[in-house]
């Protein structure tokens, strides 16, 4: 039988991603004592930056090469409340990548109980400093390869 698997990693070994942890600060809560919904988006950015650090190519390095990556869309589904003092474990995974756009999935759980707190996703593109779309595949093949190494096997 013919092997029909696709080599999404371009012949390189995938990189295992360690979850990011965030300790909830008092100022992140609202009058009801729960984390304000806007903070989850900030945590997603923190986790995404950590993902890139693990990839070996930080946001700072990306910007030093005149690449910016604006958010195109964000989706957040709140499953249970997070409060001051909780530690949230954020698992990130690259759900899609084609050299021009990047999709990231997030799964946030309580560190102590393992309870699911939030499921989220974000989509990004890559632009030069003038706002013109760029293809990492063509312009930065070493970065392109790293994103494929980080791609979630289930995507």
Image (cartoon, rainbow, N blue to C red):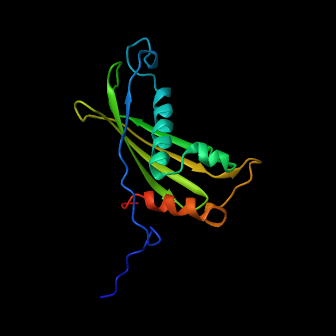
The answer to whether residue 42 is left or right of residue 154 is right
Q: Is residue 5 above or below residue 107?
A: below
Report the residue at 41% width, 60% height from top.
Answer: 155
Eyeballing the image, is 154 above or below 92? below
Pinpoint residue 108: horizontal percent, then vertical percent.
35, 37
Closer-to-camera residue (4/142): 142
Residue 135 in the image: x percent, y percent? 65, 61
Q: Give the residue at the far right of this rendering.
A: 130
Kindly indicate the quadrant of the structure image that contains residue 26.
top left
Residue in view at x 38 percent, y 76 percent: 5
* Residue at 26%, 34% in the rendered image: 115
Q: Quadrant of the N terminus?
A: bottom left
Question: What is the residue that sits farthest to the top in this orientation?
Answer: 31
Q: Position of residue 61 (x, y in %)?
A: 60, 47
Where residue 121 appears, as percent x and y from the top left, is 46, 45
Q: Is residue 123 above or below residue 145?
A: above
What residue do we see at 39% from left, 62% from top? 14
Front-most of 20 and 38?
20
């Amino acid at each position: 039988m013919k092997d029909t698997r696709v080599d999404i990693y371009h012949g390189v070994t995938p990189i295992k991603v360690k979850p990011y942890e965030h300790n909830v600060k008092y100022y992140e809560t609202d009058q009801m004592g729960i984390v304000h919904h806007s903070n989850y988006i900030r945590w997603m950015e923190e986790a995404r930056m950590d993902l890139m650090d693990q990839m070996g190519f930080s946001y700072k390095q990306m910007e030093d090469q005149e690449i910016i990556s604006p958010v195109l869309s964000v989706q957040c589904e709140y499953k249970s409340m997070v409060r001051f003092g909780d530690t949230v474990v954020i698992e990130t995974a690259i759900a899609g990548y084609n050299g021009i756009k990047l999709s990231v999935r997030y799964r946030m759980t309580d560190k102590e109980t393992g309870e699911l707190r939030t499921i989220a996703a974000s989509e990004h593109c890559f632009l030069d400093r003038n706002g013109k779309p760029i293809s990492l595949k063509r312009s930065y093949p070493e970065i392109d390869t790293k994103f494929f190494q980080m791609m979630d096997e289930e995507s």
